[in-house]
């Protein structure tokens, strides 16, 4: 069997897709991983030589994805596309950005998901039950695996291993990083509105995100030197974003490595609304959420996040407060299992097994109608990926306005020197 595995965010998905690749190879299958953002055409070239039987993607929403994956379907009409749905927990509004909208995105492909929470959403959007397989999240197979120690991370990033580490996982910044100029703003607005949000909701989100990030930065500036002598504050930007807002000098802004490496070494986990709070709870860390200044309405509240302890003022963090948060976590009981599904460490095996089971399933012709990409758009993609490769290798990335989107997503470029750490991450559990 020939398998192609696409990933989007390196720090989020790299370990999981490498282990998936490894399991196929151990069974005698041919499998390869590619960046959907920077190696799409490389994958197509590979596919023409090794016609794929199965293709994994991290998201599949509408005709935009149909166009890009049509070139692979044209190579094999029986290709089984599997959506791993990396964004399964959100608000009622953000769900519109991740749930499938076209007949093909719903029932022309298969949906391998974490648990019952997301299955009910897919069914409500018209996805057939026989297109859904609950496997668990392959990323959670690494819950007990850290590729490094606190001492090693400290040496690599200038941190003190003797201090308490506070990890803040940022979920905001997606809009801001991609709307830094009018052209980018318009491109993102079109994507957002095509998936069901209104212009008013989009512009309000951009405005409120800027206000929330600035307010949080102001709060961090109130922390004293005494705080810095006792704690290391590690600020982890959302995958696929770059910071264009200022933070205090002593804040360690680190977006490298899978978040499990950092969660395993931190003494307190904080977030605004990152779903990695579920992983932090799963790994037994004291965890709380820091609300934004613009408190979202019920349609914008992230599912599950508000069930955790709330910390309104980070300047109040002390050793005793961390212990109170830990005690509060215990009193509130287990939350993560409602959203993450089975976390027994064997999701990847179930994914491989389920992919074999669907090989003989026939897709109805009515569900096999999908959009095709134009030759012009395909050519532009070839040019974009070649230019990005040249810019990275020559050090020009960030200086060429035409590659602004590549610069924003630079942490997801697999051949960038910034991602040298991935060579030691082979998907071992």
Image (cartoon, rainbow, N blue to C red):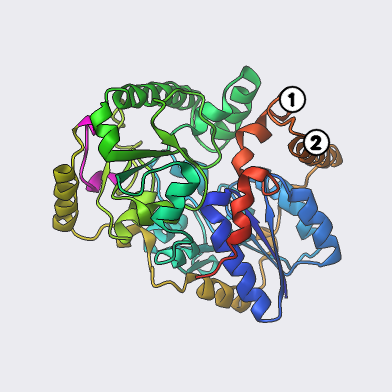
**Disc 1, SS:** loop
Give the x, y percent position of residue 57. 62, 56
**Residue beneath the point at 57% across and 29% down:** 178
Foreground residue among 77 and 208: 208
Percent position of residue 72, x then y = 77, 58
When asked about the image quadrant of residue 13, the answer is bottom right
Residue 67 appears in the rendering: yes
Quadrant containing the N terminus is bottom right
Disc 2, SS: helix
The residue sitting at the top extreme is 182
In the image, residue 195 above or below residue 117: above
Q: Position of residue 259 (x, y in %)?
A: 45, 51
Report how far apart the C-alphas of labels 1 and 2 lie in the structure: 10 Å
* Residue 296 appears left or right of 258: left
Residue under the image location 63 percent in, 28 percent down: 187
Could you tell which of marks 1 and 2 lies nearer the N-terminus? 2
Q: Say which residue appears at 55% left-offset and 61% top-offset.
A: 15
- Is 310 in the magenta? yes
103 relative to 388, above or below = below
The answer to whether residue 390 is above or below residue 423 is above
| Within-10-Å neighbours for mark 1: few <14, some 14–19, many 20+ | few
The answer to whether residue 212 is left or right of residue 178 is: left
**Residue 387 shows which numbered tag?**
2
**Residue reaching furthest to the bottom:** 27
Q: Nearer the viewer, residue 189 or 393?
A: 393
Q: Quadrant of residue 340?
A: bottom left
Queried whether the magenta region covers residue 80, the answer comes back as no
Q: Are marks 1 and 2 in contact (CB under 8 Å)?
A: yes
The residue stretch that appears in magenta: 305-315
Q: Which residue is mark 1?
A: 400
For residue 251, side relative to residue 26 (left or right):
left
């Amino acid at each position: 069997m020939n398998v192609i595995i696409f990933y989007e965010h390196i720090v989020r998905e790299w370990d999981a897709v490498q282990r998936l690749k490894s399991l196929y190879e151990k069974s005698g299958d041919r499998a390869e991983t590619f960046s959907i953002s920077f190696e799409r055409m490389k994958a197509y070239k590979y596919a023409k030589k090794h016609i794929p039987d199965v293709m994994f993607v991290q998201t599949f929403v509408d005709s935009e994805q149909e166009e890009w994956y049509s070139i692979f379907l044209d190579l094999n009409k029986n290709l089984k596309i599997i959506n791993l749905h990396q964004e399964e927990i959100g608000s009622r509004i953000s769900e519109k950005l991740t749930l499938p909208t076209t007949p093909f995105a719903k029932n022309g492909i298969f949906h391998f998901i974490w648990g019952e929470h997301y299955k009910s959403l897919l069914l409500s959007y018209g996805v057939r039950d026989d297109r859904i397989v609950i496997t668990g999240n392959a990323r959670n197979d690494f819950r007990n695996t850290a590729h490094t120690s606190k001492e090693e991370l400290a040496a690599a990033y200038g941190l003190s291993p003797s201090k308490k580490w506070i990890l803040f996982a940022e979920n905001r910044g997606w809009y801001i990083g991609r709307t830094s100029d009018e052209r980018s703003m318009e491109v993102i607005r079109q994507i957002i509105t095509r998936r069901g949000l209104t212009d008013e909701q989009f512009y309000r989100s951009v405005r409120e995100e800027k206000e929330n990030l600035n307010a949080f930065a102001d709060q961090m500036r109130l922390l004293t030197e005494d705080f810095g002598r006792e704690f290391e504050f590690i600020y982890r930007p959302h995958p696929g974003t770059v910071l264009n807002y200022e933070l205090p000098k002593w804040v360690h802004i680190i977006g490298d490595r899978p978040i499990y490496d950092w969660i395993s070494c931190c003494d307190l986990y904080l977030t605004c609304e990152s779903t990695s709070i579920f992983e932090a709870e799963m790994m037994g860390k004291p965890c709380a959420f820091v609300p934004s200044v613009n408190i979202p309405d019920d349609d914008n509240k992230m599912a599950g996040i508000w069930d955790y302890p709330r910390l309104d003022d980070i300047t109040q963090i002390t050793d005793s407060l961390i212990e109170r948060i830990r005690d509060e976590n215990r009193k509130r009981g287990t939350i993560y299992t409602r959203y993450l599904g089975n976390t027994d460490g064997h999701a990847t095996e179930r994914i491989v097994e389920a992919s074999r089971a669907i090989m003989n399933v026939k897709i109805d012709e009515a569900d096999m109608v999908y959009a095709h990409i134009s030759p012009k758009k395909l050519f532009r993609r070839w040019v974009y990926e070649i230019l990005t490769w040249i810019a990275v290798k020559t050090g020009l990335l960030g200086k060429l306005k035409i590659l602004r989107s590549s610069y924003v997503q630079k942490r997801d470029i697999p051949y960038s020197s910034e991602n040298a750490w991935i060579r030691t991450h082979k998907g071992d559990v």
